[in-house]
Amino acid sequence: MGAQVSVQNLSKKMGHVQALQQVTTLFEGGRVHGIIGPNGAGKTTLLRLLAGLLHPDGGSIDYLINRQPYTRAQIKAATGYFPQEPSLYPDLSCMEHLEFFRDLYGLPEADFRPRAQELLAATGMSPFAGRPAGKLSGGMYKKLGLMCVLLNRPSLLLLDEPTVGVDPVSRQELWDLV
């Protein structure tokens, strides 16, 4: 059976706007799922609900492994959320960002160093490990944001338009990384 995320009758209001109403779906583990719709359709709201950044007004989200529910701590540890515009600190270098996320995730140093080097190499960012985020191109900035999300090897990866605004080469590199 594996991992699943089951969404039942999910509703969310943002101010006076009904962002989601009675959404029901099932996300099967080991597959890529896409959420498609026009601007304002609630795609980002749904992803933020799945990531636990927002709480639904109605309905439920159940995270299951082999039909057993995840605990709140397991959901947090297993989920990686990449927003449309990653929030990075302009004065911190690429490596300092990875170290910051290492601390957030509580990764042991023995696991962190090889993973950080793997991600830097996979993105072609190794030569830029010491460059501040504020001095990166748009594509490099997005790669850094994605590296930070992937550092913890999340089981559930939520991507909110990760390649918008980047050149075709960087777009392909981002998808190759995912």
Image (cartoon, rainbow, N blue to C red):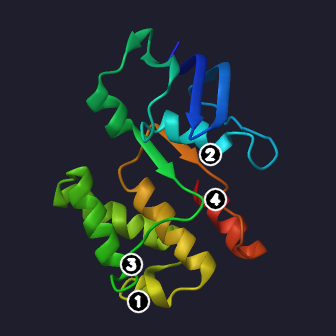
Mark 2, secondary structure of its residue: helix
Return the mark for residue 162. Answer: 4
Mark 4 and mark 1 residues within 8 Å of each other at the beta carbon: no
Question: What crowding class fits label 1: few (fewer than 14 Cα within 10 Å), some (14-19), or many (20 or more)?
Answer: some
Q: Which residue is mark 3?
A: 94
The label nearer to you, 4 versus 3, is: 4
Q: CA distance from mark 3 to mark 2?
A: 26 Å
* Image position, residue 171 (x, y; %): 71, 67
Q: CA distance from mark 3 to mark 1?
A: 6 Å
Mark 4, secondary structure of its residue: loop
Return the mark for residue 44. Answer: 2
Mark nearer the N terminus (4 vs 3): 3
The label nearer to you, 2 versus 4, is: 2
Q: Within the image, what quadrant is residue 35 found in?
A: top right
Q: Which residue is mark 1?
A: 131
Q: Residue at x 43, y 55 (%)?
A: 149
Q: Residue at x 82, y 46 (%)?
A: 38
Mark 3 and mark 1 residues within 8 Å of each other at the beta carbon: yes
Mark 1, secondary structure of its residue: loop
* Image position, residue 124 (x, y; %): 54, 77
Q: CA distance from mark 4 to mark 3?
A: 18 Å
| Residue 37 position (above or below residue 65) | below
Q: Within the image, what quadrant is residue 6 found in?
A: top right
Mark nearer the N terminus (3 vs 2): 2
Q: Residue at x 68, y 39 (%)?
A: 42
The label nearer to you, 1 versus 2, is: 2
Q: Nearer the viewer, residue 34 or 125?
A: 34
Badge 3 amino acid: Cys
Mark nearer the N terminus (1 vs 2): 2
The label nearer to you, 3 versus 2, is: 2
Which residue appears farthest toward the front when viewing the image?
A: 16
Mark 3, secondary structure of its residue: helix
